[in-house]
Image (cartoon, rainbow, N blue to C red):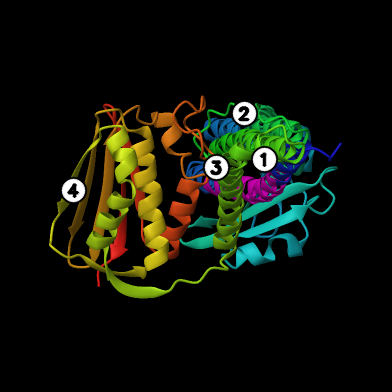
């Protein structure tokens, strides 16, 4: 029963609500008893004062008519307060009773301990059976009967305790009805709240199980704007990253397989041809050069993979020194001169200053510029343009390399720094790369504690990176 989050949430919250209402009911019933008793005492005291006034009138006008009116009013007061009113004189003799069934007791005497405190001018309150006069327990309130500022007797008002309990029970019944309705509403609210919390977690758990099976296409649909919603969004972002990583892994395997298979097939075929003399002796040198080029391609691929692994593991330390980045760019352009001329590319260079000295690892930055310029030439249109600019402020130097061409789709921009990711899926432009260049560039710039950005709009692509100004 308690294995699921839903059952735990539902049970715990429902138990808390029940316990809260139980404690509230106990407190209410306790306070209610005190309140009802206090209210009853005030009512009886007030009524006793009215009876005192009536008795004074009877003393002053003692005739049958006044006595008849006196008894009628006494009965009325007793009925309205649900009490039995007893009036005694100074020696404890009962002179009047509000209940006709007790009229036979008129003229009898009460025990002195019942009224001696009242004759001193004090009010009293007792719970009992009024010295055996009543069969049930009553609340008794006693007041002095005063005439001409003297105590001439006492007035007792006796109300049965069951009558008071009935009032409390009626109020408690109303409370229990309210509690039952409130618990029902609370249960529904807790039920749906627990569902709203547990259902998204179930959905995430279900999707996670599919991930464990190697399927990364599942997503969770959570519309909540709270922490659960944030968890769902984070999960979906993680799923996107995993799916992209899996796609890159498969793409990498395909790319590396292609990169390895093609040169290895070429090398193997040419060497076999030389050994079995299928290739004439005069052409062997030509084919050995091809084998050498393919071997160098394999070596570059392996070296890039090793370098990237070392960078990500933090095993490559920087050799920081001061050098002129402008001069480095000039030399890089000369290196790509043949390829630039083959595509008839126009190269425009803008240096904000004649010399821009930076404090960085010279070999690493040379590799960054070479990789970015290689991509710019590779993906630039024939007869296109490449623009290189170097600007600076008080603390940093900014290098930007821009080319016109096919550009990069917006959805690809956030993945271009990932290992093995290639925007040119058809390999029509990039026939030699394995998708490691930009990952290496990103790692080198990150090692320097600097930033690199890419943007692509309206047929151009620009890469910008910063360096510490020397």
Q: Residue at x 22, y 67 (%)?
A: 395
The residue at 80%/47% (across/down) is 137
Image-quadrant location for residue 387: top left
**Separation (CA) of disc 2 from disc 3:** 14 Å
Q: Earlier in the sequence, mark 4 or mark 3?
A: 3
The residue positioned farthest toward the left in the image shown: 353
Give the secondary structure at mark 4: strand
Q: Are marks 4 and 2 in contact (CB under 8 Å)?
A: no
- What is the x, y in percent for residue 286? 56, 40
Residue that label 1 marks: 267
Q: Position of residue 424 (x, y in %)?
A: 47, 29
Q: What is the distance, in whole Å, between disc 4 and disc 2 at their CAs?
A: 49 Å
The mark that comes first in sequence, 4 or 2, is 2
For the residues labelled 2 and 3, say whether their Cβ atoms are less than 8 Å apart.
no
Q: Which residues are magenta?
A: 20-46
134 with respect to 154 (left or right)? right
| Residues at marks 1 and 4, CA–CA distance in whole angstroms | 41 Å
| Label whose residue precedes the other's in the sequence (2 or 3) | 2
Q: Is residue 15 visible?
A: yes
Q: Which residue is mark 2?
A: 220
Indicate the position of residue 404 as horizontal and vertical percent values.
27, 32
- Mark whose residue sits in front, 1 or 2: 1
Magenta stretch encompasses residue 427: no
* Residue behind mark 3: 227
Please tell me whether the stretch drawn in magenta is mainly helix, strand or loop. Answer: helix
Give the labeled residue for mark 4.
349
Residue 468: where, in percent of width, then height?
29, 67
Asked whether 247 or 142 is in front, the reply is 247
């Amino acid at each position: 029963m308690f294995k699921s989050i839903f059952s735990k949430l539902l049970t715990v919250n429902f138990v808390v609500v029940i316990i809260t209402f139980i404690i509230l009911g106990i407190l209410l019933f306790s306070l209610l008893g005190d309140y009802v008793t206090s209210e009853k005492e005030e009512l009886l005291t007030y009524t006793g004062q009215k009876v005192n006034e009536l008795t004074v009138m009877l003393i002053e006008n003692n005739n049958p008519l006044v006595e008849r009116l006196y008894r009628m009013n006494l009965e009325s007061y007793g009925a309205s307060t649900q009490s039995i009113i007893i009036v005694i004189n100074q020696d404890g003799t009962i002179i009047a009773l509000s209940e006709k069934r007790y009229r036979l007791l008129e003229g009898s005497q009460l025990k002195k301990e019942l009224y001696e405190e009242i004759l001193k001018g004090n009010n009293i309150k007792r719970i009992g059976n009024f010295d055996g006069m009543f069969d049930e327990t009553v609340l008794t309130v006693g007041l002095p009967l005063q005439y001409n500022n003297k105590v001439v007797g006492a007035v007792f008002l006796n109300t049965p305790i069951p009558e008071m309990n009935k009032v409390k029970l009626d109020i408690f019944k109303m409370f229990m009805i309210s509690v039952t309705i409130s618990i029902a509403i609370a249960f529904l609210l807790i039920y749906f709240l627990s569902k709203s919390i547990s259902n998204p977690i179930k959905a995430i758990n279900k999707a996670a199980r599919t991930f464990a099976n190697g399927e990364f296409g599942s997503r969770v649909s959570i519309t909540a704007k709270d922490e659960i919603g944030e968890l769902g969004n984070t999960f979906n972002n993680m799923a996107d990253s995993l799916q992209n990583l899996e796609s890159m892994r498969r793409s990498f395997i395909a790319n590396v397989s292609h990169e390895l298979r093609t040169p290895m097939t070429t090398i193997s075929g040419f060497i076999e041809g030389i050994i079995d003399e299928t290739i004439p002796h005069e052409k062997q040198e030509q084919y050995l050069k091809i084998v050498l080029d393919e071997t160098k391609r394999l070596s570059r691929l392996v070296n890039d993979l090793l370098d990237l692994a070392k960078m990500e593991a933090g095993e490559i330390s920087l050799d920081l020194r001061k050098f002129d980045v402008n001069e480095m760019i000039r030399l890089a352009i000369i290196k790509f001169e043949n390829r630039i001329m083959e595509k008839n590319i126009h190269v425009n260079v803008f240096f904000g200053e004649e010399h821009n000295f930076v404090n960085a690892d010279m070999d690493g930055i040379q590799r960054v510029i070479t990789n970015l310029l290689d991509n710019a030439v590779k993906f630039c249109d024939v007869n296109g343009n490449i623009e290189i600019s170097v600007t600076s402020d008080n603390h940093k130097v900014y290098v930007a390399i821009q080319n016109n061409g096919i550009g990069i789709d917006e959805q690809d921009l956030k993945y271009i720094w990932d290992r093995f990711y290639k925007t040119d899926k058809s390999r029509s432009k990039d026939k030699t790369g394995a998708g490691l260049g930009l990952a290496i560039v990103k790692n080198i710039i990150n090692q320097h504690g600097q930033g690199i950005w890419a943007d692509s709009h309206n047929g151009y692509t620009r890469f910008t990176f910063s360096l510490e100004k020397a």
